[in-house]
Image (cartoon, rainbow, N blue to C red):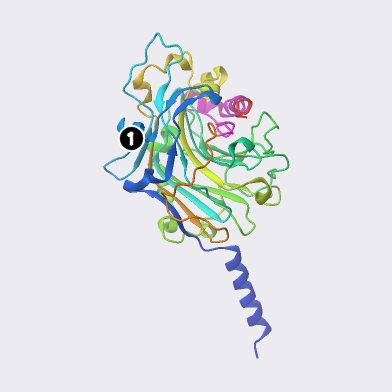
Amino acid sequence: MISLALLTSLFASQLVAAQNPKYSIAQDFSGSKFFDGWTFTNGNDAKNYGNVAYLAKDVAMTQQLAYVNPAGNAIVKVDNTTVGSPQDAAYGRASVKMNSTQPFTKGSLVIMDALHFPYGCSVWPAYWSQGSPEDAWPQFGEIDIVENVNLAPINQMSLHTSQGCTLASDTQVTGKIVSNDCYNNTNGNQGCIIQMPDNSYGEAFARNGGGVYAVEWSSTGNGIRAWFFPRSSIPADMTSANPDPSTWGTPTAAWPESGCNSSKFFGPQTLIINISICGAYAGSASVFEATCPNQGTCLDLVRNPRNYDNAYFEISYVRIYSDGSTPTQSQSGASTATASRTQSGANATGTTGSSNGSIRNSAGLVSAVLAVVAGAWILA
């Protein structure tokens, strides 16, 4: 006869298993096939007023703005060789914006291992996701994973949604909660922001060997959670066939279901990687002065290619895992077209904390300036 204790133990083990789903690989962007699963925007950055010309895939690869280096890492970069014409007041430097050709869904774990994020005065990069179709934004949500501008060293993550998604101030995270309302019409679409730790972005991120960003959209009641691990503390199972977020400790950022029903506020998400220049956020006078003091104006820098030597992503891999709870297509390289909205709709996500030198000493002021200005330029 089975004892009550044994039944209780079996029930508890099943409950834990249900709460900690097993993830397996669904899409793998790495090595020589990294660029197989992306579509490239061909055109300008009109909605963000960015001084860039996004190139089609074949042109970007020919011009070495998107390629795999000898180490096997993907490089996505801004042109740093062409001298802009002084007569061209609207000069747009060549750059890249790429969207994953198939979305990830609830029940997914998205991991990026990067050695370098773009930085420098006038530089505005983003690694983010948005729901489709883009014209319905923010109905299907947006997740800003990495975004900031100029010389700011601290990344901030955020969500952007329709009305009703919030972040409780007592949510257990190792990051710093900056704002709580994810609704796009609140605080100029600042979003619900959580600030990452030092060395999570910019020159410091590169100097420390980069690191890993992992985002889980849980199918078992944990909402949306994210972890940032610097190179020296990446969990051993991160590159395994079945990474297990339940072993990674308190998340750096989290948006629990209790405040934001992710099934209601989010639809399948398209990953996006892009680098803009100046524009409504990085080029805003107050933001530029806060993160690039004594550098003139943002537009003063656009024509000088040397200003963009550090304006590149170096990515070891992006991998999307699924727990099987939602049907997904497998492997990178599928050809389902997805939405291509403008720069990470939040642009408030980049509400950075500070920058090097004197800016670091006024982190609170800079964070406030960036939050307000960035929020005011979220794309419609």
Q: Which residues are magenta?
A: 345-373
Where residue 213 sits: x, y (%)?
48, 46
Tell me the amino acid under the disc marked 1. Met
Q: Tag 1's secondary structure? A: helix
Vertical comparison of 116 with 235: above or below: above
Where residue 222 sits: x, y (%)?
62, 55
> Which of 57/79 is in front?
57
**Residue 235 vs residue 257: left or right?**
left
Where residue 74 sits: x, y (%)?
35, 41
Label 1 crowd (10 A; few <14 / some 14-19 / many >=20): some
Vertical comparison of 244 with 5: above or below: above
Quarter in which the N terminus is drawn: bottom right
Does the segment drawn in magenta span residue 205? no
Q: Using the rendered image of the protein, determine whether residue 235 is visible from the camera's viewpoint.
A: no
Residue bearing the label numbered 1 = 61
Does the segment drawn in magenta span residue 368? yes
Extreme left residue here? 70
